[in-house]
Image (spheres, helix red, strand yellow):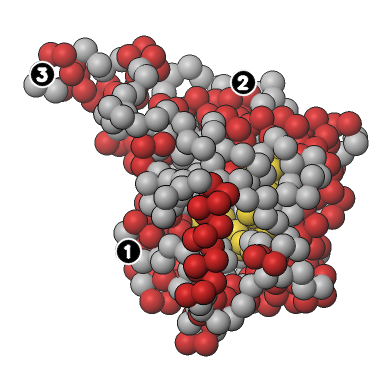
């Protein structure tokens, strides 16, 4: 087994979801306190069982799409080979902001996704090369701090196309082979809409002997086949996950509602697991069961929905009070959002991130501003109570999400290697008119 005997002993008596842990101090701790000598020798479960708050990173595909390194649509991570410097720099920014996990940029890096609908990546580079490059970059940056490296897999076109359990697990296993070769610190199965596929992913990742986390992109209604959020958590733990939770598709408020249901499900089943949450940095109160991908604004007009750093403060505190000790972000989360998490939980963690050297608590730096009305904003009460205006006089506050009701088994979800044809697009455009009532 990969775990040391000391880590196994820690697991047995670990207070997995102790929400009563209090801050060590009400004063802001120093910036950049060096915990590398101790922390770097400990694995994920050791850290969690010792009461450490694990800070995840943010959203790579959305951030790198905006920077010009990822194509919206396939959302695949060939930038690890084509533009490694861009991936490396984003990792570094998250590390500086306080992330204690460098998640490999292997989202949608399964072979079947890299060749889906005309994608050239598998043929030009190979999935193995993309995954290996992602691991090398993540490890390089993790070694610059006290961060762990997480090898990540996500849902597959093969599952949506109703391929067999054997076929889908073979897809995961090819990525796992790379993670084992590169000796990542733990595994993460993330972004699953169907708990069955997430269970298969966990079962494969457990073959590594390393800790495994599992997060689903579901809301309080459960997965797309109707399995409740609580039952999803139970199934994932029984499959072997050491930590469970949600990521993506929904905002912090919705994700924490789902986490509450997951926690209750585990308690009712008398099961224990660490909890992990990594929501969107977009407000999604109007989303339906399938999340933000159903919003008309997805993916190119989501900016009006972005969380402020102060809203992230609230999210971090609410998550911590719920007993969640792995707190991060997904799509839309930029380094300044992660910095907000570390600043909110600075007393509990005992130090601030390096990025806080240029960011005084609750806008304190504004006291140096030349304008008096701006200096007056250098206080917590101002930013906590602010309700930001949109600046869009005719913009509706909420959207009507697309509700196609399409999930695994529907003919529209059967994937193909060939590019989407003009006729197929026309069918989708016509359906958009009929289902959503939009003019296209």
Residue plotted at (55% across, 25% down)? 317
Can residue 248 be seen here? no
Dot 1 corresponds to which residue?
Answer: 68
Front residue of 164 and 23: 164
Q: CA distance from mark 1 to mark 2?
A: 42 Å
Dot 2 corresponds to which residue?
Answer: 22
Residue 41 point in image, percent of width and height? 61, 54
Badge 2 crowding class, 10 Å Cα cut-off, few under 14, some 14 to 19, many 20 or more, is few
Q: Nearer the viewer, mark 1 or mark 3?
A: 1
Front residue of 353 and 431: 431
Dot 3 corresponds to which residue?
Answer: 371
Q: Is residue 412 above or below residue 28?
A: below
* 139 displayed left or right of 357: right
Residue plotted at (80% across, 30% down)? 264
Front residue of 118 and 376: 118
State the quadrant of the C terminus.
bottom left
- Considering the numbered disc 3 on the image, is that residue within a helix, a strand or a loop? loop
Q: Residue furthest bottom?
A: 123
* 99 displayed left or right of 86: right
Earlier-in-chain disc, 3 versus 2: 2
- Considering the numbered disc 2 on the image, is that residue within a helix, a strand or a loop? loop
Q: CA distance from mark 3 to mark 2?
A: 38 Å
Can residue 152 be seen here? yes
């Amino acid at each position: 087994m990969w775990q040391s005997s000391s880590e196994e002993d820690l697991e047995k008596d670990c207070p997995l979801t102790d929400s009563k842990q209090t801050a060590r101090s009400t004063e802001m701790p120093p910036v950049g306190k060096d915990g590398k000598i101790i922390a770097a020798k400990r694995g994920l479960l050791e850290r969690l069982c010792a009461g450490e708050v694990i800070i995840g990173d943010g959203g790579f595909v959305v951030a790198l799409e905006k920077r010009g390194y990822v194509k919206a649509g396939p959302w695949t991570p060939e930038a690890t080979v084509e533009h490694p410097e861009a991936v490396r720099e984003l990792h570094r920014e998250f590390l500086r902001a306080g992330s204690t996990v460098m998640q490999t940029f292997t989202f949608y890096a399964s072979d079947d996704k890299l060749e889906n609908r005309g994608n050239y990546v598998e043929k030009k580079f190979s999935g193995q090369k993309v995954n290996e490059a992602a691991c090398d970059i993540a490890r390089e940056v993790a070694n610059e701090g006290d961060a762990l490296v997480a090898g990540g897999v996500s849902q597959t076109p093969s599952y949506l196309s109703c391929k067999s359990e054997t076929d889908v697990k073979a897809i995961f296993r090819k990525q796992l082979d790379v993670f084992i070769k590169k000796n990542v610190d733990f595994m993460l199965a993330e972004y699953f809409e169907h708990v069955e596929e997430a269970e298969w992913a966990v079962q494969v990742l457990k073959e590594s002997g390393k800790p495994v986390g599992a997060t689903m992109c579901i809301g309080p209604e459960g997965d797309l086949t109707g399995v409740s959020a609580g039952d999803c958590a139970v199934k994932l733990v029984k499959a072997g996950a050491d930590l469970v939770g949600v990521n993506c598709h929904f905002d912090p408020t919705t994700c924490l509602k789902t986490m509450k249901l997951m926690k209750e499900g585990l308690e009712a089943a008398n099961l224990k697991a660490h909890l992990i949450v990594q929501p969107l940095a977009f407000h999604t109160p109007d989303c339906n069961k399938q999340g933000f991908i159903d919003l008309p604004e997805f993916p190119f007009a989501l900016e009006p929905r972005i969380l402020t750093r102060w809203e992230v403060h609230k999210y971090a505190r609410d998550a911590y009070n719920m007993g969640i000790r792995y707190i991060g972000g997904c799509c839309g989360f930029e380094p300044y959002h992660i910095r907000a998490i570390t600043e909110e939980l600075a007393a509990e963690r005992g130090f601030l991130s390096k990025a806080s050297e240029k960011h005084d608590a609750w806008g304190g730096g504004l006291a140096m501003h030349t304008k008096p009305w701006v200096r007056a904003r250098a206080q917590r009460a101002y930013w906590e109570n602010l309700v930001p205006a949109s600046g869009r006089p005719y913009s509706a506050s909420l959207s009507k999400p697309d509700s196609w009701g399409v999930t695994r088994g529907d003919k529209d979800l059967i994937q193909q290697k060939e590019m989407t044809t003009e006729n197929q697009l026309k069918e989708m455009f016509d359906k958009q008119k009929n289902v959503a009532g939009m003019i296209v």
